[in-house]
Amino acid sequence: MNIEGKFGVIGGGSWATAIAKILLAKEPGINWYMRRQDQIDDFMRQGRNPSYLSGVKFDLDRISFTSNINKVVNASDVLIFATPSPFLKAHLKKLRRSLQGKFILSAIKGIVPDDNMLMSDYFEQRYYVPRDHIAVLAGPCHAEEVALERLSYLTIGCRSREMARVLAARLANDFIHTTISDDVVGIEYGSVMKNIYAIATGICHGLKYGDNFQAVLLSNAVREMKLFCNATDPLHRDIVEAAYLGDLLVTAYSKFSRNRLFGTMIGKGYSVKTAQIEMEMVAEGYYATKCIHEINEKYQVNIPIVDAVYRILYERSSPTVEIRKLAEKLA
């Protein structure tokens, strides 16, 4: 395995595009897999992603595109997965090449649906990638701000701190600051749960709750996140670090947050299906809500905000009623 070898990006959305921009700030070239050949063709004609972050121009001579996932795996040493979590298994079903000998960097801020597995566990247990050869990526880092080259932050979580340091150095540039951590599970669950809490803040925004309530809501969200992470993996962690609290705050408050937007639409009375159709983007928090709810059947952690969002999204409970009940529980 060559941790300093060529990067392969897997995904064609805004986050994958942002990651490609980050890489090409320093790397001489990358491999890039997109599912749709027509998207690649349009990209090649226009010099940019026609569907996402279309203001970012790329040097096409430094990108090897393919719509065949096996080709990008064969040609790459470090594979960065940046697809929405609901679509990961569909991509991997096309895989005929072993992932052993590759380093996996998951930039997917979600859980594998149905299996209810973290990405690091999924690659280890289903594809036999050693734990030391798997890393995860956390923010706060919105794709849209990467496109604008606004200073952003990435945390690379890996059980091997040496591997994390190498990746951190390769990803760092003038507009990306990197740090490392060995708290893989906490970073993954934090990245998943912050999307649920962003939906909650969006619902409250849609219901016209103010900043004072939102501050209390997020204070309780931090507490919930800490309790859940500690229950699933009792590792010492500082929940106020950027990978946890910072990522939560930017996802809950930013105008770029698709999960907050999704929640706002629900709060204004949209059905889940209508909101998903109108957004034309995946709100990871929708899928994460069900996964965390089901995982918590084992751990029985007190996470009332997640429970309220679950009832609203999956049991069609009234947002007005659920948030009113939730407000009575928050301290």
Image (cartoon, helix red, strand yellow):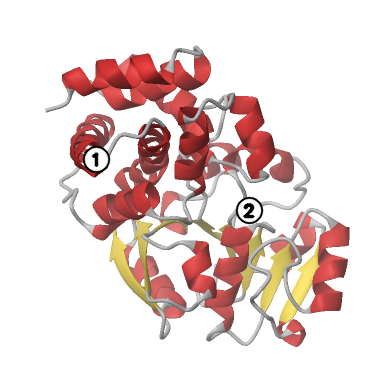
- Along the horizontal axis of the image, is 210 left or right of 152? left
Classify residue 278 by image quadrant: top right
Q: Earlier in the sequence, mark 1 or mark 2?
A: 2
Q: Position of residue 326 (x, y in %)?
A: 26, 20
The amino acid on which the numbered mark 1 sits, given as a three-letter code, is Leu
Residue at the spot of label 1: 218
Classify residue 6 by image quadrant: bottom right
What residue appears at the point 30 percent right and 44 percent down from the top-left corner?
186
- Along the horizontal axis of the image, is 65 left or right of 273? right
Outermost residue to the front: 208
Q: Position of residue 89 (x, y in %)?
A: 67, 38
Q: CA distance from mark 1 to mark 2?
A: 39 Å
Q: Secondary structure at mark 2?
A: loop
Residue at the spot of label 2: 99
What residue appears at the point 58 percent right and 55 percent down from the top-left corner?
82
- Does 54 sit above or below residue 131? below
The amino acid on which the numbered mark 2 sits, given as a three-letter code, is Leu
**209 or 33: which is nearer to us?**
209
Does residue 243 show up? Answer: yes
Classify residue 230 by image quadrant: top left
Does residue 301 show up? Answer: no
**203 or 231: which is nearer to us?**
203
Q: Secondary structure at mark 1?
A: helix
Q: Residues within 10 Å of mark 1 (few under 14, many from 20)?
A: many
Q: Position of residue 238 (x, y in %)?
A: 16, 51
Q: Quadrant of the N terminus?
A: bottom right
- Along the horizontal axis of the image, is 270 left or right of 183? right
Viewer-side label of 1, 2: 1
What residue appears at the point 22 percent right and 36 percent down from the top-left corner?
213
Q: Are marks 1 and 2 in contact (CB under 8 Å)?
A: no
- Does 237 sit above or below residue 93? below
Q: Quadrant of the C terminus?
A: top left
